[in-house]
Amino acid sequence: MKRSFGEVIYRLDTVSSTQDTLKDLFQCREVLPGAVVVARAQSQGRGRRDNAWDSPTDLGLWMSILVLPVGPEEYWTWTPLWAGLAVKRALADLLSDQRSCDPNQIELKWPNDLMIGNTKLGGILTERVQNGVGQAVVLGVGVNLSHRREDFPPHLRDRAASLLQVSGQSYSPDSLLEKVTAQFERLYPLLNPINPGLIGEIWLNHAWGLKARLGLSSNGQQYSGLFIGLGEYGEIRLEAPVEGVRQFAHAEHIVRIE
């Protein structure tokens, strides 16, 4: 059983993380797929690999949503790419009447970042959860909306961006939340059942660094190659002159090599 995305929304002031809050609700069997937790601020927001995610009060959309992919579990690895498409489309809807910022500037960096050029606008965190009934996926979404340069920690000021900085206009978290939940609902048929081919095809149309030479670190090793596409389970595929094609399911860091 699934409620529509955003039909049930828990609105909170400050939490350690929306991700942990929604995971706890699911494990206590208090929510169904489609439920959302959104907070004004997070004191311990995090991204992939437990990296801290700066989440100041009212400056961004800090939310988590419960999703139930349908299909073989080995293909659940496509969920973060699917979520990236939904958030990218939501941002495009939000910016549709904004002449100073072309929504096509927003690209998807494998596996879960939203980029404008080489600066990060937002990110997605995917975690599987299980209770006594079954399992699902908790998707954390963080998008920088109203930050000015000085609102970012010093070490992020040249690496992060907000919609205010790129468009000159401030957007409320609720305005993006409405569009994000609508896009999750609209794109859910790609996850029910999971359609890796179509998710991959659409995702690559918005991919950051596609056909460019990338440097990648995985399990402590450094690699480089031309970003040529995605593997069967959503892995990133790089092609190098000597090593040929390699694919990676995990990466600690990815950069574009000029």
Image (cartoon, rainbow, N blue to C red):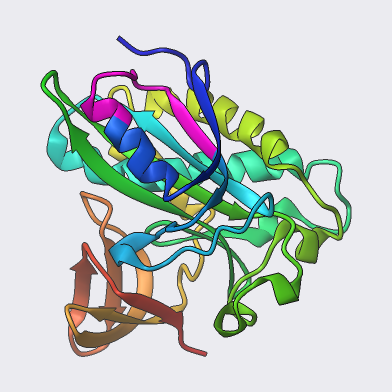
Query: Which x, y percent locates residue 164?
Result: 78, 59
Query: Which x, y percent locates residue 149?
Result: 73, 75
Q: What residue do we see at 49% from left, 71% from top?
A: 209
Towards the viewer: 49 or 118? 49
Q: What residue do we see at 43% from left, 24% from top?
A: 35
Task: Classify 220 as above or below 53.
Answer: below
Q: Is residue 253 left or right of residue 5?
A: left
Towards the viewer: 4 or 96? 4
Span highlighted in magenta in the image: 25-38
Task: Classify 31 as above or below 135.
Answer: above
Query: Which x, y percent locates residue 67?
Result: 35, 29
Q: Is residue 257 left or right of residue 12?
A: left
Q: What residue do we see at 34% from left, 61% from top?
A: 48
Query: Which x, y percent locates residue 151?
Result: 70, 70
Query: Does the magenta portion include 221?
Result: no
Task: Classify 254 as above or below 16.
Answer: below
Task: Please tell me how many numbered marks the rendered image carries.
Answer: 0
Q: Is residue 57 left or right of residue 220?
A: right
Task: Classify 185 as above or below 39.
Answer: above
